[in-house]
Amino acid sequence: MARYIRHASAFSVLLLAALLGNAARVQVVQAGSYDANPANRRPTIARYQHPRGDILVGGEPVTGSTDTGEQLRYERTYRNGPLYAPVTGFASQMYGTTFLENAEDAVLSGTDPMLSPFPVWNDVARAAGPAGNVVTTLDRGAQEAAYRGLHGRRGAVAAIEPGTGRILALVSTPSYDPAALSGNSEATASAWARLNHDPEKPMLNRAVRQTYPPGSTFKVVTAAAALDAGVTVDLDARTDSPDPYRLPGTTTRLTNEGDGCADTSLREAFRWSCNTVFAKLGVDVGVTDMAATAEAFGFNDGRLSVPFPVSPSSFDTSVDKAQLALSSIGQYNTRATPLQMAMVAAAVANGGRLRTPYLVDRTTRRGGETLAGGGLQPARQVMRPSTAVQLRELMTDVVTEGTGTNAALPGAVVGGKTGTAQHGVGNSGVPYAWFVSWAQAEGDLEPKVAVAVVVEDASADRGEISGGGDAAPIAREVMRSVLGL
């Protein structure tokens, strides 16, 4: 009998070992595949069992959570959703997350181990801690001024604090309400389909994900390259610039919108945006130095993140002289996001030093304790300080007595550059209106804001399609708000 008991015991131990082995296989070895299985709803249910952390602007939340009482309990809500959509993005139970909701998801969802006093235990238990908050760098007044100025037209605004790189405004219109995508109902699916098929592309973040030909605003970069390279040193000396200018190696003649550009000085050419002068300057500088200057400003850099990725702006380095001439006036293959052009203006305003822009000031625990600091980066010198001084002088002239007078602000020094960018087959599209600028209030030691504005659907009257007419007033109101004027 004892022999049978021993055999039964051994068999029972064997069965127990097999059971434990299988449990270990399922829970450890194959845990990842089970977690990733679409049929496994436990992680999704757990994700929405607690309110999501908030995104803050000016110390006040622009997001929230509402208890639906359903299996996926908490849905995301938004305050002034269309105003902040290019910053927050959406957090959807059906379609995932975008922009800050995505980049800071670990903090906002409570899964960041740094949120818990016992991160190792939370990791083992796979439990989410209390959600944290994300404090942005946005200036509420500047954001509202930019959104109000665009007034639903297709376009975008980016504003930066030159000395730090803090993003003060990031607006894209037309916009949408991210709350429409929060749930998992038929209404959510319908809103998703409607927004994705809307020809106005309201979910496209034009400020950071759309590149445009920058037109004459790129002449800031060309002027910087020419001054740094010593191709021109005196702002008031006459240049060797015929009007019209025959593009090298071609029979194509480049002209200007106005008269008086032939052999004019750099100061007058910048003030009145003479294409012929800057096209020839770009050729004289050469593709190597033009590309080096553009890349110092941030062109051709696909690594920029604020913290969500920014589409790279481009300056073509494989061009002949005719193509280089057009590239140097912001045409041909030259493309830029509004954020990139705000960086150009900010570098001029900051003495030739460029701070990498960032949108998150800090992340915090629920009680307000700082979890991680902001994204302040060391400044890099993109041009000589003396060149920056000269460019500030040129940009100031544009606003005081040139094409950018609509950006003037009583009580402040304002520098700017207008731009009208051709596009479409045979330049048949309605030109984009651009304006880049910076502003320094009387009594301030340095400029406090740099702005870039692009308006896609400006007036159809060619005389009114200009950065000075359509974009400069928007920039002026953003700068006025930041400076408190």
Image: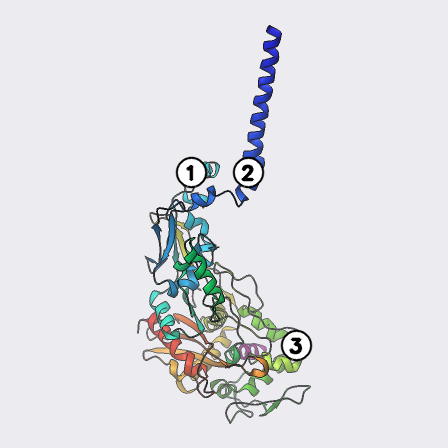
Rendered position, 434 above or below 17: below
Tell me the residue at 33%/68% (across/down).
Answer: 141
Q: Residue 319 carries which label?
A: 3
Is residue 309 at least partly visible in the picture? yes
Specify whether residue 222 is painted magenta: yes
The answer to which of 352 and 318 lies nearer the viewer is 318
Per the model, the C-alpha gap separating discs 2 and 3 is 53 Å
Identity of the residue drawn at 37% across and 62% down: 81
Q: Is mark 1 on a helix, strand or loop?
A: loop
56 shown above or below 246: above
**Quadrant containing the C terminus in the rendered view:** bottom left
Q: Residues within 10 Å of mark 3 (few under 14, many from 20)?
A: some
**Cα distance between the residues tagged 2 and 1:** 23 Å
**Callout 2–callout 1 Cβ contact below 8 Å:** no
Residue type marked 2: Ala
Q: Tell me the quarter of the image containing the N terminus.
A: top right
Determine the residue located farthest toward the front in the rendered image. Answer: 186
The residue tagged 2 is 31
Residue 383 drawn at (x, y percent): 53, 72
Is residue 60 left or right of 416 when viewed as pictured? left
* Lower sequence index among marks 2 and 3: 2
Question: Tag 2, which secondary structure?
Answer: helix
Residue 279 x, y percent position in the rendering: 58, 84
Give the residue number, with chain letter if any, for mark 1.
118
Residue 268 in the image: x percent, y percent?
Answer: 49, 88
Q: Examine the structure image and report whether residue 234 is included in the region drawn in magenta.
A: no
Q: What stretch is highlighted in magenta?
A: 221-230
Amino acid carrying mark 3 in the image: Val
